[in-house]
Image (cartoon, helix red, strand yellow):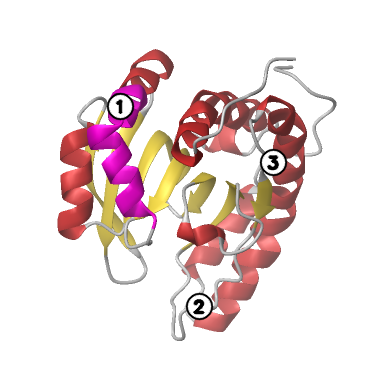
Protein backbone atom coordinates (compact mmCIF):
# COMPACT_ATOMS: atom_id res chain seq x y z
CA UNK A 1 0.00 0.00 0.00
CA UNK A 2 1.43 3.37 -1.04
CA UNK A 3 0.06 5.30 1.95
CA UNK A 4 -3.21 5.78 3.82
CA UNK A 5 -5.72 3.27 5.13
CA UNK A 6 -7.69 0.50 3.39
CA UNK A 7 -9.03 1.32 -0.06
CA UNK A 8 -12.75 1.82 -0.65
CA UNK A 9 -12.08 1.74 -4.38
CA UNK A 10 -11.97 -1.75 -5.88
CA UNK A 11 -11.61 -0.81 -9.55
CA UNK A 12 -13.78 0.54 -12.35
CA UNK A 13 -16.61 -1.86 -13.28
CA UNK A 14 -15.78 -3.53 -16.59
CA UNK A 15 -19.40 -3.82 -17.70
CA UNK A 16 -19.96 -0.06 -17.23
CA UNK A 17 -17.95 0.72 -20.38
CA UNK A 18 -20.93 -0.45 -22.43
CA UNK A 19 -22.70 2.75 -21.36
CA UNK A 20 -20.69 4.75 -23.90
CA UNK A 21 -22.45 2.90 -26.73
CA UNK A 22 -26.02 3.73 -25.66
CA UNK A 23 -27.51 5.69 -28.60
CA UNK A 24 -29.94 7.90 -26.70
CA UNK A 25 -28.18 10.89 -25.13
CA UNK A 26 -30.10 11.00 -21.84
CA UNK A 27 -30.09 7.24 -21.39
CA UNK A 28 -26.35 7.23 -22.07
CA UNK A 29 -25.81 9.97 -19.50
CA UNK A 30 -27.76 8.03 -16.87
CA UNK A 31 -25.92 4.79 -17.69
CA UNK A 32 -22.50 6.46 -17.45
CA UNK A 33 -23.32 8.05 -14.10
CA UNK A 34 -24.89 4.90 -12.72
CA UNK A 35 -22.05 2.71 -13.97
CA UNK A 36 -18.97 4.75 -13.04
CA UNK A 37 -19.74 7.39 -10.44
CA UNK A 38 -20.03 5.13 -7.38
CA UNK A 39 -16.53 3.76 -8.07
CA UNK A 40 -15.12 7.21 -8.90
CA UNK A 41 -16.70 8.64 -5.76
CA UNK A 42 -14.99 5.98 -3.65
CA UNK A 43 -11.71 6.67 -5.43
CA UNK A 44 -12.12 10.37 -4.70
CA UNK A 45 -12.56 9.73 -0.98
CA UNK A 46 -9.46 7.50 -0.95
CA UNK A 47 -7.36 10.04 -2.81
CA UNK A 48 -8.39 12.96 -0.60
CA UNK A 49 -7.35 10.97 2.48
CA UNK A 50 -3.98 10.23 0.92
CA UNK A 51 -3.22 13.54 -0.79
CA UNK A 52 -4.64 16.20 1.51
CA UNK A 53 -2.11 15.54 4.30
CA UNK A 54 0.64 16.10 1.69
CA UNK A 55 -0.98 19.06 -0.05
CA UNK A 56 -0.18 22.71 0.57
CA UNK A 57 -3.90 23.59 0.51
CA UNK A 58 -7.07 21.48 0.69
CA UNK A 59 -8.29 19.53 -2.33
CA UNK A 60 -11.96 18.95 -3.15
CA UNK A 61 -13.44 16.05 -5.16
CA UNK A 62 -15.92 16.65 -7.98
CA UNK A 63 -17.99 14.44 -10.30
CA UNK A 64 -19.74 15.87 -13.37
CA UNK A 65 -23.46 16.07 -14.12
CA UNK A 66 -22.83 15.49 -17.85
CA UNK A 67 -25.76 17.70 -18.86
CA UNK A 68 -24.01 20.96 -19.75
CA UNK A 69 -23.90 22.77 -22.09
CA UNK A 70 -27.39 22.17 -23.42
CA UNK A 71 -27.34 19.43 -26.01
CA UNK A 72 -24.02 18.03 -24.75
CA UNK A 73 -23.34 14.49 -25.96
CA UNK A 74 -21.73 12.57 -23.07
CA UNK A 75 -18.70 10.65 -24.32
CA UNK A 76 -16.66 10.37 -21.10
CA UNK A 77 -16.81 11.03 -17.39
CA UNK A 78 -14.27 11.98 -14.76
CA UNK A 79 -13.22 12.51 -11.17
CA UNK A 80 -11.59 15.89 -10.58
CA UNK A 81 -9.60 16.92 -7.52
CA UNK A 82 -9.40 20.70 -7.37
CA UNK A 83 -8.33 23.51 -5.07
CA UNK A 84 -11.72 25.06 -5.87
CA UNK A 85 -14.78 23.97 -3.91
CA UNK A 86 -17.00 25.39 -6.67
CA UNK A 87 -16.41 26.21 -10.31
CA UNK A 88 -13.57 23.72 -10.51
CA UNK A 89 -13.53 23.69 -14.33
CA UNK A 90 -12.08 27.21 -14.28
CA UNK A 91 -8.73 25.84 -13.06
CA UNK A 92 -6.41 22.86 -13.36
CA UNK A 93 -7.47 19.59 -11.77
CA UNK A 94 -5.92 16.30 -10.83
CA UNK A 95 -8.22 14.33 -13.06
CA UNK A 96 -9.17 10.71 -13.74
CA UNK A 97 -10.83 10.63 -17.16
CA UNK A 98 -12.82 7.58 -18.26
CA UNK A 99 -13.41 7.10 -22.01
CA UNK A 100 -14.59 4.25 -24.19
CA UNK A 101 -11.03 3.57 -25.45
CA UNK A 102 -8.79 4.77 -22.62
CA UNK A 103 -8.58 5.90 -19.01
CA UNK A 104 -6.23 8.70 -17.96
CA UNK A 105 -4.70 10.03 -14.74
CA UNK A 106 -3.46 13.56 -15.33
CA UNK A 107 -3.08 17.19 -14.39
CA UNK A 108 -5.70 18.45 -16.82
CA UNK A 109 -6.97 21.74 -18.17
CA UNK A 110 -9.87 22.98 -20.24
CA UNK A 111 -7.84 25.00 -22.74
CA UNK A 112 -10.65 27.57 -23.02
CA UNK A 113 -10.79 28.24 -19.27
CA UNK A 114 -9.98 31.76 -18.11
CA UNK A 115 -7.10 30.59 -15.96
CA UNK A 116 -5.35 28.67 -18.73
CA UNK A 117 -3.59 31.87 -19.76
CA UNK A 118 -2.00 32.12 -16.31
CA UNK A 119 -0.85 28.51 -16.57
CA UNK A 120 0.69 29.20 -19.98
CA UNK A 121 2.42 32.35 -18.67
CA UNK A 122 3.89 30.48 -15.70
CA UNK A 123 5.12 27.72 -18.01
CA UNK A 124 6.80 30.13 -20.43
CA UNK A 125 8.10 32.73 -17.99
CA UNK A 126 7.91 31.28 -14.47
CA UNK A 127 9.73 27.98 -14.79
CA UNK A 128 6.60 25.85 -14.55
CA UNK A 129 7.12 24.38 -18.02
CA UNK A 130 10.54 23.06 -17.07
CA UNK A 131 9.13 21.70 -13.80
CA UNK A 132 6.41 19.88 -15.75
CA UNK A 133 9.00 18.41 -18.13
CA UNK A 134 11.13 17.27 -15.18
CA UNK A 135 8.12 15.55 -13.59
CA UNK A 136 7.31 13.90 -16.92
CA UNK A 137 10.84 12.52 -17.22
CA UNK A 138 11.04 11.26 -13.63
CA UNK A 139 7.60 9.64 -13.54
CA UNK A 140 7.08 8.43 -17.13
CA UNK A 141 4.34 10.96 -17.92
CA UNK A 142 3.52 12.73 -21.19
CA UNK A 143 2.00 15.96 -22.47
CA UNK A 144 -1.16 15.48 -24.54
CA UNK A 145 -3.59 17.79 -26.29
CA UNK A 146 -7.06 16.75 -27.45
CA UNK A 147 -9.11 18.35 -30.21
CA UNK A 148 -12.91 18.18 -30.59
CA UNK A 149 -14.49 15.34 -32.56
CA UNK A 150 -18.02 14.27 -33.32
CA UNK A 151 -19.77 11.78 -31.08
CA UNK A 152 -19.22 8.93 -30.35
CA UNK A 153 -15.51 9.80 -30.10
CA UNK A 154 -16.11 13.24 -28.59
CA UNK A 155 -12.41 14.12 -28.73
CA UNK A 156 -9.28 12.99 -30.54
CA UNK A 157 -5.65 12.92 -29.49
CA UNK A 158 -4.03 15.73 -31.49
CA UNK A 159 -0.59 15.95 -29.87
CA UNK A 160 1.59 13.81 -27.59
CA UNK A 161 5.14 14.29 -26.33
CA UNK A 162 7.16 13.12 -23.36
CA UNK A 163 9.00 16.45 -23.11
CA UNK A 164 7.90 19.20 -25.51
CA UNK A 165 5.64 21.34 -23.34
CA UNK A 166 6.10 24.38 -25.60
CA UNK A 167 4.68 22.55 -28.61
CA UNK A 168 1.86 21.18 -26.42
CA UNK A 169 0.89 24.69 -25.35
CA UNK A 170 1.03 25.87 -28.95
CA UNK A 171 -1.23 23.05 -30.10
CA UNK A 172 -3.65 23.72 -27.26
CA UNK A 173 -3.93 27.34 -28.36
CA UNK A 174 -4.26 26.39 -32.02
CA UNK A 175 -6.91 23.68 -31.97
CA UNK A 176 -7.08 22.00 -28.58
CA UNK A 177 -9.93 21.77 -26.10
CA UNK A 178 -8.03 19.81 -23.44
CA UNK A 179 -4.40 19.94 -22.26
CA UNK A 180 -2.90 17.39 -19.90
CA UNK A 181 0.24 16.01 -18.35
CA UNK A 182 -0.12 12.47 -17.09
CA UNK A 183 -0.56 8.80 -17.93
CA UNK A 184 -2.95 7.25 -20.44
CA UNK A 185 -4.08 3.62 -20.16
CA UNK A 186 -5.26 2.13 -23.44
CA UNK A 187 -8.29 -0.14 -23.53
CA UNK A 188 -8.88 -3.03 -23.74
CA UNK A 189 -5.22 -3.80 -22.93
CA UNK A 190 -5.30 -1.94 -19.60
CA UNK A 191 -8.68 -3.30 -18.52
CA UNK A 192 -7.17 -5.69 -15.91
CA UNK A 193 -5.44 -2.71 -14.28
CA UNK A 194 -8.20 -0.09 -14.38
CA UNK A 195 -10.77 -2.62 -13.15
CA UNK A 196 -8.67 -3.52 -10.10
CA UNK A 197 -7.89 -1.94 -6.76
CA UNK A 198 -4.31 -1.53 -7.97
CA UNK A 199 -5.50 1.27 -10.22
CA UNK A 200 -6.14 3.37 -7.12
CA UNK A 201 -2.49 2.97 -6.16
CA UNK A 202 -1.44 3.91 -9.70
CA UNK A 203 -3.59 7.06 -9.70
CA UNK A 204 -2.20 8.02 -6.29
CA UNK A 205 1.34 7.60 -7.64
CA UNK A 206 0.63 9.86 -10.61
CA UNK A 207 -1.23 12.46 -8.57
CA UNK A 208 1.52 12.60 -5.96
CA UNK A 209 4.00 13.39 -8.74
CA UNK A 210 1.72 16.11 -10.12
CA UNK A 211 0.66 17.71 -6.84
CA UNK A 212 3.72 20.02 -6.58
CA UNK A 213 2.88 21.42 -10.03
CA UNK A 214 -0.65 22.23 -8.89
CA UNK A 215 0.84 23.93 -5.82
CA UNK A 216 3.11 26.06 -8.04
CA UNK A 217 0.18 27.21 -10.16
CA UNK A 218 -1.67 28.40 -7.06
CA UNK A 219 1.47 29.88 -5.50
CA UNK A 220 1.32 27.82 -2.33
CA UNK A 221 3.86 25.57 -0.66
CA UNK A 222 3.73 22.88 1.99
CA UNK A 223 4.70 24.26 5.40
CA UNK A 224 7.33 22.21 7.20
CA UNK A 225 5.99 20.04 10.01
Which residues are the magenta region?
115-132
In the drawing, what numbered circle is on residue 127? 1
Residue 204 x/y as whole percent:
62, 28
Q: Which residue is mark 2?
A: 68
- What number is the disc on residue 58? 3
Residue at (70, 36) in percent of width and height: 47
Position of residue 95 measured from the top left corner of the image (x, y, whole percent): 53, 45
Visible residue check, residue 10: no
Relative vertical location of residue 30 with respect to residue 53 in this rendering, above or below: below
Instruction: Name the quadrant of the N terminus.
Output: top right
Q: Is 146 left or right of 13, judged from the image as shown?
A: left
Q: Magenta segment: does it hold 130?
A: yes
- Which of the 4 image quarters holds residue 5? top right
Q: Earlier in the sequence, mark 2 or mark 3?
A: 3
Label 2, secondary structure: give it.
loop
Distance from disc 2 to disc 3, alpha carbons, whole Å, reads 27 Å
Disc 2 and disc 1 in contact, CB within 8 angstroms: no
Secondary structure beneath label 1: loop
Amino acid sequence: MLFGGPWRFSGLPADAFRAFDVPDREQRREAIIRGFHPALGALGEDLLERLNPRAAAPLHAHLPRLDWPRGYQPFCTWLALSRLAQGYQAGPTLNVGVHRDHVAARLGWDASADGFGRFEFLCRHGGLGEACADAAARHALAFRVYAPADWPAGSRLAFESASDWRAALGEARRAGVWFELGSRYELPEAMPLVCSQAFGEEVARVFLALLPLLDRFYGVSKKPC
